[in-house]
Amino acid sequence: MCGIVGYVGRRQAVEVAIEGLGRLEYRGYDSSGIALIGADRALTVEKRAGKLVNLRSVLAARPAPPATAGIGHTRWATHGAPTDRNAHPHTDCEERIAVIHNGIIENFAELRAELENDGHKLASETDTEVVAHLLERFAGDGLAEAMRRVCRRLEGAFTLLAVSVDEPDVVVGARRNSPLVVGRGEGENFLGSDVAAFIAYTREAVELGQDQVVELRTSGITVTDFHGAPAETRDYHVDWDASAAEKGGHDYFMLKEIAEQPRAVADTLLGRVGADGQLMLDEMRLSDQELRDVNKIIVVACGTSYHAGLIAKYAIEHWAGVPCEVELASEFRYRDPILTRDTLIIVITQSGETMDTLMAVRHAREQRSRVLAVCNVNGSTIPRESDAVLYTHAGPEIAVASTKAFLTQLVACYLVALYLAQVRGTKFGDEISQIIDWLGRMPAKVEEVLGTVEPVRALARSLAAERCVLFLGRHVGFPVALEGALKLKELAYMHAEGFAAGELKHGPIALIDEGLPVVVIVPSPAGQRVIHDKIVSNIQEIRARGAKTIVIAEEGDDAVVPYADTLIRVPAVPTLLQPLIATVPLQVFACELAAAKGHDVDQPRNLAKSVTVE
Ligand code: M6R
């Protein structure tokens, strides 16, 4: 939700902090701020409501003094409106300590009352500010020990960074249920909500565990638990560089990420198919017997990742013959799902930090179910807390709207379904090989779609004045419809709904009005013919009631031609794989429509890339 950066070293901390915040701004953009400790032990705090550009303007007009230690924050507001006053960093009464925070401190009201009783003056409406004043209370113990003592008093989720004028060459961080990674440099060290914060300086990272405090100095890092006992960490090398987190000539990150999809799909397949055509998914860390014993799969995720899960269900049940449910993480956690040792939970998450999904993982593991994470971000919390992880290798996804992560999640789920089929013997080897062969051809098919999206752009621009767009699909086209609608909502701020086309007649058809644009995803006629024919009938039904039909159908499907006001052609592929190509025009459509309306495509209002609060 919020982005956090910390630095100690020989460079000017303000430059490192602003560079890092630029790369983390996708995590939240309600306000931004920095705190620096100068050589003269003076604390400088600058913060502004609004996007990072506002803070940059302040610093351009009033340059920060030299400082080689500092922290920076970009905010997604939870407690307190997005104002200058509520922007982070927050300071103690004496303005000797500055703190930034990501997460929610659930017992802040009680702590605030206690501090005010003690005479502390709190200036903001945030939950964060209590931490600065609690650190002040324990300041005599040194910043790291003070942080440990404070963390023991806090409830909720938090990543905290603090600096103090008493220790000008130290940054202290802490984490519980919220992300924080260390970047290891030569004579300098970094902290960030994710590696993007410091990728311009180092690709050597250290993964921190739950409930840990880290003390960052130029000479090294020290990590303990909240009681001061030395803690274990894991070093890893980041396999992408700063250029991967830049726009690379595209107008928006989203466009770049859409364009990267053929490569991302290929990378997700890489190394997972043996020379003999057999799938190799050792990462699942379940023996063949354990995979045979699985009697139910529950896929749990949020947002776009949930839509990937809905599609996974069709593949898992069709290929592997295992009953599969799909559930929103926020709902799964707060009911009583029937879970046993033989229930396999597959959680899907791009960021690996989504709090709803993390809570679902913990809940499932408490019930002794095994959890497989399908995740994009190495070193993030959810893979660390799961029994096994299948990384999607999409590379960094910066735009808030998920695109390449979605396609690679689908590929990972297809691989899981086929691997289960291979181990459980539910499909013949040559059937599995055929699909794997098709998967290998998908990067080229996605590329083909990307080469034909110009008319989709023109269509999107022509619809910029519309207030509502509906999306219809059947079978795997239904989750694609949901995904198309979600993209339009989050980017174009338009009313958009996805429906199962068969449900139309049970209510939604009343929404159809003269000129209403309706996007219909048509499955391959070569697949289940009956589904194809039924959706062609649905197109006729809505057209008869005045809808403007925008039809996505495969090359050569002539049955749709008379009923399509606009026809978007996609290559013919097996039905279950169609979402990999049918989604692409919908991504382009939403992106272009948002741009035509003058919206910030990469940073839509009210949203943040990774949702680390429940
Ligand atoms: O990081 P996750 O995959 O767990 O995130 C889940 C959702 O927050 C995410 O997919 C969200 O719906 C996207 N912004 C949609 O484009």
Image (spheres, rainbow, N blue to C red):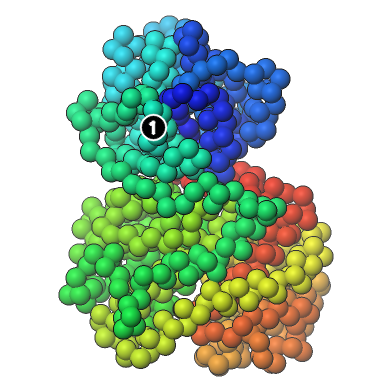
Circle 1 crowding by C-alpha within 10 Å: few under 14, some 14–19, many from 20: few
Query: Which is more toward the observer, 237 or 226?
Result: 237
**Can see residue 39?**
yes
Residue 281 location in percent, x, y?
Answer: 30, 70
Looking at the rendered image, the quarter that the C terminus falls into is top left
Q: Is residue 193 left or right of residue 443?
A: left
Q: Residue 257: x, y in percent?
A: 59, 58
Rendering coords of residue 214 (x, y %): 32, 29
Please name the residue that numbered disc 1 is placed on. Answer: 186
Cβ of mark 1 under 8 Å from ligand 1: the answer is: no
Q: Nearer the viewer, residue 229 or 78?
A: 229
56 is higher (above) or lower (below) than 274: above
Q: Residue at x 29, y 35 (%)?
A: 211
Looking at the image, how many numbered discs can be counted on the residues?
1
**Can you give x and y, in whole percent of width and height, for residue 580 in the image?**
54, 73
Question: Which image quarter: residue 104?
Answer: top left
Q: Residue at x 65, y 83 (%)?
A: 553
Residue 92 visible in the shown view: no
The kind of residue tagged 1 is Glu
Q: Give the residue at the far left of this rendering.
A: 289
Quadrant assignment, res 54: top right
- For image coordinates 45% across by 29% down, the residue present is 6
Look at 48% across and 16% down and name the residue there.
37
- Give the SS element for disc 1: loop
